[in-house]
Image: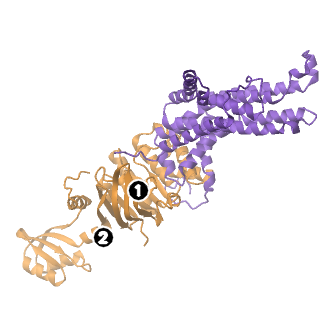
C-alpha cells in the first residue's frame, strides 16, 4: 500500500524561526488526523504539504508526489478547506463553488453541475443563491467544504473544519466527512483541536509537539488491540476461573474484590469467557473493554516528549 | 449525477488545459464589473471621444462637408501624426480613469476575504493569478486605447486616397507599443496598490498619489538642484515623450523639444522600472499564508 504522506527529515523555517524540526514518518491510512497543541506546527505542515512553504531541509511526499518538485500535480489531486475564513463575499454560494471548480480545471458546464451537487450534498441547497458573505459561520464552513470537494479530489485536507460550529452543525459536518470517506476512495487529512472529531473520522493520528513528531498512532490497530483487553468484576471461584482462562491462552491478573484483568489471545472470542464463567459457577458482575481513548494517547505522547503541561 | 441524489461522487470528466485557467479569473472579474452601472457608464464615456475623432476623419476626407462648413484652408483638417498623438493622449487619460475605478478592487476583494489560499491550493500559480487579473485591465484598457486607435487608422486608410495607408503604416507600431507600455504600467501599479490597500477609495487615492506626488517631488528636485532629471519621476510626461518620439513628432502639439530633453531610453527605463517595482510589491503581497518573522 502506498503511503498517503511520507515525511523525510522535513524541516521548515519561516523567517528566522524553525517551525518544523526534521519530521520523519510514514502515514499509510486513508484518514489521517493531525493533532497538537497551539503552535505545534500543524498548519505549517499542511501549508508545506500544499507547497505554500518550501522545506529548508528534507522533503514531504503526498500520494507519492513531492510537495516541492511536483507541487502542481499534487495540488490537482487535493481539495483544501482552510482554517480561516476564505470566500468571495459578493458571490452567491453556488457561483463561488463553480468558480473554484473551474480554476481546478473543470469545464464551465461541469463546474456548474458539480457546484450544485456539492452544495446540496453539504446541506446548503436552500441557501446556494445567497451571497456567501451573508452566511452564518457554520454555513461558511460548509461552503468551504463544498468548494473543497466539488472538483472531486483524491485527498481532502481539512484544517480545523469544525471551528466555531455549534454541536448539531459539528455533528453533521463530522458525519459528512465520514460519508465522504466511506463513499469514495478519497484520502483525508484532518487537523483539529477536538480529539473527538479526529477519533470519529480518522484511522491514524500524527501528533505534533513543538514542531516535532510526538507520536504516530494507528487508531485501527489500537482499537483492535483494546478489544482483547478485558476488565472483569467477578463473584465466585476466581482461582479456577483464571486458571481455566490461562489454559485457553489468556493472560490474567487478579486484584482484590474479585477484579480480574484479562488479555485474550487473538483467536479467542468474548463468549468463551462467559462460557468458562458459567462452567465454573462464576458470576460476572461487570465487564469493560479497555478503551485507550485518543485523549490518553495524546496525553501520553505529550508526557513522553516532556510536556505534561501540553494544552490542546 | 442528479442533484437530488445526495451522495459524494468523484469527478472523472475532462479538464480544461492548464494554460487557459488564468482566463477564468478574467471572465469572472468581467462578469462582476458589468454588474456595475457606473462602470458601464464610465466605459461608454471613455469611448465617446472616439466618435468625435471619427467625425473629424470623416470631415477631413469629405470635400462637400468642408465646403458646406465654408472651410477655406484644405490643410485645416489633416490626419497626420499630430492627430494620432491627440487620439492617444485622450484615450490614455480615459484609460487612466477606468483603471482607477476597476484596478483597486481586483485583488483587494480576494485578500479581504482570505480567498487567496483557495486559489493557490489548486493547480494554479501566483503567476497565473496575476496574469488573470492583469488580463482584466489589459483587455479593458486595450478597448479604449490601441483598438480604437487602430480602428481610426483603418477608417482614415479607407477614406483617404493616394496610398495614404502605405505612407503612414509605420504609425501602427507606436499606436500599439505606446499603448502597451501605458497599459502595462497602469495595470501593474493598480494591482500592486490593490494587493496592498483593501479600501477602494483609499486605493484609488493611492493610485492618483503614485502619479502626482512623484511628479511634484521631481519638480522640487529640479528647482533645488537646477536640473531637469527630476522629470523622470513624472511618469505621464515620460509616456508623452515616448509617444511624441514614437510618432516622429518634433514640434507642434507638445511644444518644441528643447536641448534639456530627457533621452527616450531613460523614459522607457523609468516606465519599465515602475513595472518591475510593482511586480516586486505583488510578489511580496501575494502569499497563500502570512509568514511570521521573528
Q: Position of residue A53 (x, y in %)?
A: 43, 53
Q: Circle 1 sits in a helix, a strand or a loop, which is it?
A: helix
Query: From this viewpoint, is residue A57 visible?
Result: yes
Q: Residues within 10 Å of mark 2 (few under 14, many from 20)?
A: few
Question: Which of A84 and B267 lies nearest the eye of the viewer?
Answer: B267
The reply to whether discs 1 and 2 touch (Cβ–Cβ < 8 Å) is: no
Q: Position of residue B192 (x, y in %)?
A: 53, 38
Q: Residue at x 44, y 51 (%)?
A: A81
Q: Residue furthest left?
A: A256
Q: Residue furthest top?
A: B70
In the picture, one chain is orange; tell me its letter: A
Tell me, for residue B69, which label it has, or none. Answer: none
**Which residue is the site of mark 1?**
A177
Which chain letter matches label 2?
A: A
Q: Residue at x 52, y 27 (%)?
A: B201
Instruction: Describe residue A21's horizontal placement relative to residue A86 as left or right.
Output: left
Q: Residues within 10 Å of mark 1 (few under 14, many from 20)?
A: many
Which chain letter matches label 1?
A: A
Q: How is the image coloured?
A: by chain
**Which residue is the site of mark 2?**
A221
Q: Position of residue B203 (x, y in %)?
A: 52, 30
Q: Residue at x 44, y 55 (%)?
A: A54
**Quadrant of image for the N terminus of chain A:** bottom left
Mark toward the viewer: 1 or 2: 2
- CA distance separating discs 1 and 2: 21 Å
- Are dots 1 and 2 on a single chain? yes
Q: Locate residue A239: give its quadrant.
A: bottom left
In the picture, one chain is purple; tell me its letter: B
Q: Residue furthest bottom?
A: A247
Q: Locate residue B74: give its quadrant.
A: top right
Q: Please say if B6 is above or below B184.
A: below
Amino acid at each position: 500500500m502506498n503511503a498517503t504522506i511520507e515525511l523525510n527529515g522535513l524541516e521548515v523555517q519561516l523567517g528566522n524561526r524553525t517551525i518544523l524540526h526534521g519530521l520523519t514518518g510514514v502515514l499509510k491510512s486513508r484518514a489521517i488526523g493531525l493533532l497538537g497543541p497551539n503552535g505545534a506546527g500543524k498548519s505549517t505542515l499542511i501549508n508545506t504539504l500544499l507547497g505554500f512553504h518550501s522545506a529548508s531541509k528534507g522533503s514531504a511526499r503526498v500520494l507519492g508526489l513531492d510537495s516541492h518538485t511536483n507541487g502542481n500535480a499534487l495540488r490537482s489531486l487535493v481539495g483544501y478547506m482552510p482554517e480561516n475564513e476564505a470566500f468571495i463575499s459578493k458571490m452567491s454560494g453556488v457561483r463561488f463553488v463553480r468558480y473554484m471548480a473551474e480554476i481546478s480545471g473543470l469545464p464551465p458546464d461541469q463546474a456548474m453541475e458539480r457546484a450544485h451537487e456539492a452544495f446540496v450534498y453539504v446541506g446548503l441547497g436552500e441557501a446556494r443563491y445567497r451571497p456567501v458573505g451573508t452566511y452564518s459561520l457554520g454555513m461558511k464552513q460548509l461552503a468551504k467544504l463544498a468548494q473543497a470537494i466539488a472538483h472531486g479530489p483524491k485527498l481532502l485536507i481539512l484544517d480545523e473544519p469544525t471551528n466555531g460550529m455549534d454541536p448539531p452543525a459539528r455533528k453533521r459536518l463530522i458525519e459528512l466527512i465520514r460519508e465522504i470517506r466511506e463513499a469514495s476512495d478519497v484520502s483525508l487529512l484532518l487537523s483539529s483541536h477536538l480529539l473527538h472529531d479526529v477519533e470519529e473520522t480518522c484511522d491514524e493520528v500524527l501528533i505534533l509537539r513543538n514542531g516535532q513528531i510526538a507520536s504516530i498512532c494507528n487508531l485501527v490497530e489500537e482499537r483492535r488491540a483494546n478489544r482483547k483487553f478485558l476488565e472483569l468484576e467477578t463473584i465466585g471461584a476466581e482461582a479456577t476461573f483464571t486458571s481455566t482462562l490461562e489454559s485457553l491462552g489468556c493472560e490474567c491478573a487478579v486484584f482484590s474484590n474479585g477484579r480480574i484483568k484479562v488479555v485474550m489471545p487473538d483467536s479467542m472470542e468474548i463468549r468463551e469467557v462467559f462460557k468458562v464463567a458459567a462452567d465454573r459457577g462464576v458470576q460476572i458482575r461487570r465487564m469493560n473493554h479497555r478503551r485507550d481513548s485518543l485523549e490518553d494517547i495524546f496525553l501520553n505522547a505529550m508526557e513522553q516528549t516532556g510536556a505534561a503541561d501540553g494544552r490542546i | 449525477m442528479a442533484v437530488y441524489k445526495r451522495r459524494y461522487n468523484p469527478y472523472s470528466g475532462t479538464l480544461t488545459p492548464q494554460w487557459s485557467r488564468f482566463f477564468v479569473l478574467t471572465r469572472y472579474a468581467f462578469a462582476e464589473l458589468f454588474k456595475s452601472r457606473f462602470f458601464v457608464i464610465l466605459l461608454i464615456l471613455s469611448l465617446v471621444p472616439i466618435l468625435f475623432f471619427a467625425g473629424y476623419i470623416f470631415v477631413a476626407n469629405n470635400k462637400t462637408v468642408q465646403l458646406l462648413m465654408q472651410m477655406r484652408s484644405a490643410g485645416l483638417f489633416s490626419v497626420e501624426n499630430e492627430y494620432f498623438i491627440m487620439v492617444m493622449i485622450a484615450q490614455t487619460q480615459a484609460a487612466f480613469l477606468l483603471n482607477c475605478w476597476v484596478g483597486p478592487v481586483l485583488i483587494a476583494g480576494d485578500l479581504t476575504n482570505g480567498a487567496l489560499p483557495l486559489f493557490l491550493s489548486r493547480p494554479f500559480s501566483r503567476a497565473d493569478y496575476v496574469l488573470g487579473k492583469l488580463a482584466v485591465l489589459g483587455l479593458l484598457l486595450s478597448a479604449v486605447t490601441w483598438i480604437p486607435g487602430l480602428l481610426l487608422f483603418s477608417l482614415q486608410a479607407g477614406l483617404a486616397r493616394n496610398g495614404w495607408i502605405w505612407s503612414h503604416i509605420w504609425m501602427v507600431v507606436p499606436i500599439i507599443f505606446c499603448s502597451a507600455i501605458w497599459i502595462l504600467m497602469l495595470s501593474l501599479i493598480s494591482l500592486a496598490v490593490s494587493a496592498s490597500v483593501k479600501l477602494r477609495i483609499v486605493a484609488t487615492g493611492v493610485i492618483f498619489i503614485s502619479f502626482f506626488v512623484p511628479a511634484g517631488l521631481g519638480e522640487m528636485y529640479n528647482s533645488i538642484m537646477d536640473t531637469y532629471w527630476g522629470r523622470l519621476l513624472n511618469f505621464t510626461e515620460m509616456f508623452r515623450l515616448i509617444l511624441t518620439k514614437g510618432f516622429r513628432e518634433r514640434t507642434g502639439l507638445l511644444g518644441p523639444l528643447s536641448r534639456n530633453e530627457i533621452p527616450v531610453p531613460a523614459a522607457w527605463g523609468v516606465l519599465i522600472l515602475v513595472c518591475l517595482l510593482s511586480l516586486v510589491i505583488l510578489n511580496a503581497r501575494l502569499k497563500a499564508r502570512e509568514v511570521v518573522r521573528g
